[in-house]
Amino acid sequence: MCGRYRLTSKERYIAQHFGLDESEVHWTPRYNIAPTQEAAIVRQDRKQPKRNFSLMRWGLIPAWAKDISIGFKTINAMCETAAEKAAFREAMRKRRCLVPADGFYEWQKLSRKEKQPYNIGMADDSLFAFAGLWERWHDPAGAALNSFTILTTDANSLVSGIHDRMPVIVKPEDYYLWLDPGMNDPAGVADLLKPLDARLMKKYPVSTRVGNADNDDAEIIKEIVPISAAPETGRLF
């Protein structure tokens, strides 16, 4: 799964990477993006060949939902079943998006009480994109709320030692197909929903501070000595 990630790249790099109008990209670096918070997505305009940068709530709320509480359960969607699940199938056909990121976090269970978080990203620290879906929901008063989810797949060899799932990472050469509003058949993009080659990625341990969503600063992404390898202290005998 993917329950936390970061997007710390500058606006001009985000615009360049995704082929966006730089004047429309407004983003303050975030080191610890958490569910229900607003985050950046990139989508394709259906009426003109233009990509748009938007901020949406993380946790997809289907158009038919009675309230927004379902969004706590829909931060991720399994790529194997997204085309069939009621919450995601329309978005899978008509509202695919890219979720910009330059790292995500997963926790390795060490014991019943201890978990070691890892930052996972590209080997060269470059910007990348998760495969996402977005939806528009209206409250009883008619106000619109846009939200998104991140698709997940089986973990590759880099991630599998920590978790059995990982976010789907779309290769830059596949952005056009994934975003294409004319591609309404999920089968046409199925080949994109595979684990990224582990050789293109890296991971390293980070502070447990990342577990608190209020901690959103550059210290979070610094590599540390992992808990399991830290020297024991306070032992007299």
Image: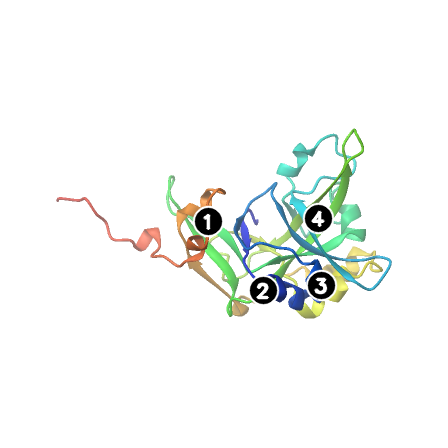
Q: Mark 2 points at which residue?
A: 127
Q: Which amino acid does label 3 sit on?
A: Asp
Do the numbered discs 3 and 1 sit on residues whose CB atoms are within 8 Å?
Answer: no
Please tell me whether mark 3 or mark 1 is closer to you in this view.
Answer: 1
Q: What residue type is labelled 2?
A: Leu
The quarter of the displayed image where residue 168 is located: bottom right
Mark 3 nearby-residue class (10 Å; few <14, some 14–19, many ≥20): few
Labels 1 and 2: the sequence-earlier one: 1
Q: Which residue is situated farthest in the left direction here?
A: 237
The quarter of the displayed image where residue 69 is located: top right
Q: Quadrant of the C terminus?
A: top left
Labels 1 and 4: the sequence-earlier one: 4
Left-right relation of 55 to 162: right
Measure the alpha-carbon separation of dots 4 and 2: 27 Å
Residue positioned 62% across, 65% down in the render: 12
Q: Which amino acid does label 1 sit on?
A: Trp
Q: Mark 3 points at which residue?
A: 191
Classify mark 4: helix, strand or loop.
loop
Measure the alpha-carbon separation of dots 3 and 1: 28 Å
